[in-house]
Amino acid sequence: MSTGRFITLEGIEGAGKSTAARFVAEHLRGLGHTVLATREPGGTPLAERIRALVLERGPEPVTPVTETLLMFAARALHVTNVIAPALVRGEWVVCDRFTDATRAYQGSGRGVDPALIESLAHAVHGALNPHLTLLLDLPVTEGLRRARERSGVASDRFEAEAVSFFEKVRAGYRGIADAEPARVRTIDALRPLPEVQAQVLAALRPLTRGAA
Ligand code: Z5A
C-alpha cells in the first residue's frame, strides 16, 4: 500500500484557507485519491473540545504558554488518532492549519520561545511533517475585512486581536516560507478566487504528478 501525502494550509484570519482546503480536497478526490479533510485546533471529538476552550473569550487571561500547550494537546490527539492512521492507510490528508500556525501565532504573535515550540513539535509529531504547505498570504487589513464581512463582529479570542498582532503573525509565516521553500509554497491570496485556485493547482502538481 502506498503512503499518503500530508498537505497543510496556513495563513492569517480570512486569508481563504478553508476555501482553498475544500478546493484541494475536491481536486484530489477528482484524481482518484482518498482524502481526509480535517482542521486544527480540532479534528477529533476531544480535540474539538480543546478548540472550544482555546477560542472562547472568557474573563480569565490565557497565558501564551497555556495557549501553546493547549494547541499541542489537541494536536497530539489529532496526529495519533486521525492523521497518522490515515497516512498509513494511504490516504491524502488535507489539514486546515498545523504546527506552522503555532510557530506564527504563539511564536511570532505572542512571543513564545521557539525552542519550546520545536521541542513540543518533536514530542508530539516527531518526523511527521507536511509534504506540502500552502501559505495563503495577503495584507492583514484585507484578511480581516473578508473575515468580518463573512461572520460579522469578532467572536473568538483571536478574532478580537489588533491588526498589529496579525502583522506579527503574517511576518512569522513569511519567515517560515523563506526558511523552507521546498515545503512551503506561498499563494498570493489577494487575487480573485480563480487565480488563487490556479496557483494552488500549480503548487500541487509536483506532488500529484509523483503519485499518479
Ligand atoms: N491557532 C493558533 O493560534 N495556533 C495554532 O496552532 C492553531 C490555530 C492550529 C482558529 O483557526 C484560530 O486558531 C485562528 C488561529 C488559531 N485564529 N485566527 N485568526 P481557524 O483556522 O479555525 O480560523 P480562522 O483563521 O479564523 O479561519 P477563517 O477566518 O475561517 O479564515 P480562512 O479559512 O482563511 O478564510 P475562508 O473562510 O476560506 O475565507 C474567508 C472569506 O473570504 C470567505 O467569505 C470566502 O468566501 C472569502 N474568500 C476566500 N478566498 C477569496 C478570494 N480569493 N477573493 C475574495 N474572497 C475570498
Image (cartoon, rainbow, N blue to C red):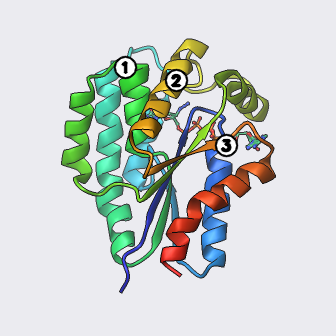
In percent of the image, x 67 and y 43: which residue is there?
16
Circle 1 SS class: loop
Q: Nearer the viewer, residue 97 or 152?
A: 97
Residue reaching furthest to the bottom: 1
Circle 2 SS class: loop
- Give the CA separation, mark 3 to mark 1: 27 Å
In percent of the image, x 22 and y 53: which residue is there?
126
In percent of the image, x 59 and y 82: which residue is there?
32
Q: Is residue 185 above or below residue 38?
A: above
Work out whether mark 2 precedes mark 3 in sequence or the reverse, and give the earlier one: 3
Amino acid type, label 2: Arg
Please give the residue where the numbered disc 1 appears in the rendered image.
Answer: 62
Q: Is mark 1 within 8 Å of ligand 1?
A: no
Q: Is mark 3 within 8 Å of ligand 1?
A: yes
Left-right relation of 142 to 34? right
Work out whether mark 3 precedes mark 1 in sequence or the reverse, and give the earlier one: 3
Amino acid type, label 3: Gly
Badge number at residue 187: none
Q: Are marks 2 and 1 in contact (CB under 8 Å)?
A: yes
Viewer-side label of 3, 1: 3
- Give the CA separation, mark 2 to mark 1: 10 Å
Amino acid type, label 1: Val
| Position in image of residue 183 (x %, y %) | 43, 52
Please give the residue where the numbered disc 2 appears in the rendered image.
Answer: 157
Left-right relation of 29 to 36? right
Q: Check disc 1: other Cα within 10 Å, few if <14, some if 14-19, many if 20+.
A: few
In percent of the image, x 62 and y 75: which residue is there?
29
Quarter holding the N terminus? Answer: bottom left
Please give the residue where the numbered disc 3 appears in the rendered image.
Answer: 16
